[in-house]
Image (cartoon, rainbow, N blue to C red):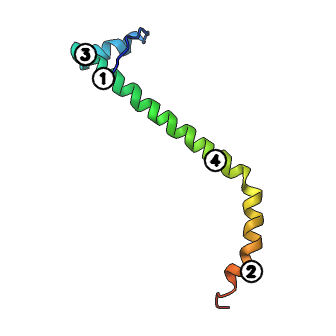
């Protein structure tokens, strides 16, 4: 896998905690895994939001279709 070198800043307490808990040779992998995990969470949240918006946009159409089929759906139910 191709890798890129990035430079970014983090709060001092985060940098100190990273140094305290992760050895120097494993920091890049640790940060990469943490960023990848957070990106997956963001993608899931964006998908969830898109689904909610889609369902809301189709709400009126879904109600209309349900009303059209309600008689056929309940036809065989005992009374």
Q: In the rendering, at what x and y percent does residue 2 appear?
A: 34, 19
Whole-angstrom CA distance, mark 4 to mark 1, is 33 Å
- According to the picture, the residue beneath numbered tag 4 turns out to be 52
Q: In the rendering, at what x and y percent does residue 27 appear?
A: 28, 17
Mark toward the start of the polypeptide (4 vs 3): 3
Tag 4–tag 2 contact (CB < 8 Å): no
Mark toward the start of the polypeptide (4 vs 2): 4
Element class at badge 2: helix
Label 2 Cα neighbours within 10 Å, binned few <14 / some 14-19 / many ≥20 = few
Q: Residue 14 occupies which quadrant of the picture?
A: top left
Q: Residue 61 occupies which quadrant of the picture?
A: bottom right
- According to the picture, the residue beneath numbered tag 1 turns out to be 30
Q: Is residue 51 left or right of residue 24?
A: right
Of discs 2 and 1, which sits in the foreground? 2
- According to the picture, the residue beneath numbered tag 3 turns out to be 20
Mark toward the start of the polypeptide (2 vs 1): 1
Identify the residue shown where x is 54% and y is 39%. Answer: 45
Q: In the rendering, at what x and y percent does residue 77 appear?
A: 64, 87
Identify the residue shown where x is 30% and y is 17%. Answer: 28
Mark toward the start of the polypeptide (1 vs 3): 3
Vertical relation: 74 (above or below) 9:
below
Element class at badge 1: helix
Identify the residue shown where x is 29% and y is 22%. Answer: 29
- According to the picture, the residue beneath numbered tag 2 turns out to be 71
Vertical relation: 48 (above or below) 16:
below
């Amino acid at each position: 896998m191709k890798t890129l070198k990035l430079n970014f800043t983090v709060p001092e307490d985060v940098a100190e905690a990273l140094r305290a808990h992760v050895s120097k040779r494993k920091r890049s992998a640790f940060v990469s895994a943490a960023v990848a995990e957070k990106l997956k969470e963001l993608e899931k949240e964006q998908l969830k939001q898109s689904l909610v918006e889609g369902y809301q946009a189709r709400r009126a159409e879904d109600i209309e279709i349900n009303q059209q089929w309600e008689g056929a759906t309940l036809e065989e139910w005992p009374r």
